[in-house]
Image: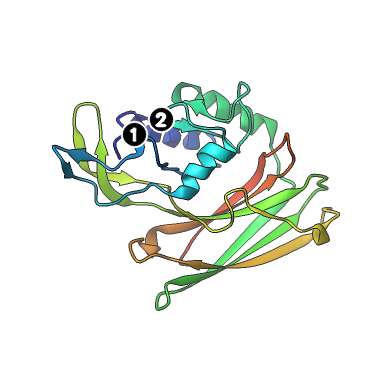
Amino acid sequence: VSCPPCPAGHAAMRSITASQNDNMIIIAYHIFNYAQANPVEKDGQKLSKYDFRTQDATDVANSVLGGLGGMPEAAFDRTLYKDKHLSSRIEWHAAADARAAAQTTTPVNIHITSTYDATTLEATVRVKLAYTDDVNFKQTLTLAVIEDSIIDAEKYDDKIEKDYVHEHVLRDIVTPVTGVLIPAKVDPKVAGRVYERTFKVPIKTEWHAEHCKLVAFVSNDEPNNRDVVHTEEVHLIQ
């Protein structure tokens, strides 16, 4: 990835995750039409084996988060910090702390199970939502596939590291990028209410299934409230 500031961003995220007692799930979005997200090249030779950019990531950055102002930037549960969704690296610790302080509990638990068929390269994924408190908002469910431990080139200001370890790379958003609406039949969303949905998830041959994870999250779906209220992550192969 042609982003010299990004390794420092990765280190910052590791530090923030530790400061939040590992209570944080990360998705790394790589977008089109932004030079720093491009695969690494030098003297006309492509050094990257992979192109991490996806249309899903681009749509999230532009349509959900309001557009990128630089790289790296981050959002925490898609909430606003200083009146914007995306923050620069120097603001991340404060933005994460603010989000953690604002929501100490969740009104819905998420349970994910996955059955992977290595012959068909398809996973059957069941997501179960169990409400623990009353919710009056419309909400959506999003399911994504990410991959860890991808060895590929990373560009710094003064060098190119060919064997950089890329983590949390978004591979696919299985649902629409804004999620699927939790249907009205679930209403009223009160403590004890349960909703389940099953997804068929194709896994591309260039992905390493043993390093893939499934991330599911529930978001509010109101004009002025798109906050993520809970997220869970499991290995694709269980």
Residue toward you, 21 or 199: 199
Where residue 117 sits in the image (x, y, percent)? 45, 75
Regarding residue 21, the answer to whether it shows in the image is no
Q: Which residue is mark 1?
A: 36
Q: Looking at numbered disc 2 in the image, what kind of residue is underneath it? A: Met
Residue at 29 percent of width and 51 percent of height: 50
Judge whether 224 appears above or below 118 on screen. above
**Which residue appears farthest toward the right when viewing the image?**
188
Q: Quadrant of residue 83?
A: top right
Q: Residues within 10 Å of mark 2 (few under 14, many from 20)?
A: some
The answer to whether 64 appears left or right of 121 in the picture is right
Judge whether 168 appears above or below 224 on screen. below
Where residue 130 sits in the image (x, y, percent)? 73, 58
Residue at 36 percent of width and 48 percent of height: 52
Quick one: SS at disc 2?
Answer: loop
Q: Earlier in the sequence, mark 1 or mark 2?
A: 1
The answer to whether 83 appears left or right of 18 in the picture is right
Quick one: SS at disc 1?
Answer: helix
Q: Quadrant of residue 66?
A: top right
Q: Which residue is mark 2?
A: 71
Where residue 45 sits in the image (x, y, percent)? 15, 44
Q: Are marks 1 and 2 in contact (CB under 8 Å)?
A: yes
Q: Looking at numbered disc 1 in the image, what kind of residue is underneath it? A: Gln
Question: In which quadrant of the rendered image does the N terminus lie?
Answer: top left
Residue at 54 percent of width and 34 percent of height: 75
Rounded to the nearest whole Å, what is the CA distance between mark 1 and mark 2?
A: 7 Å
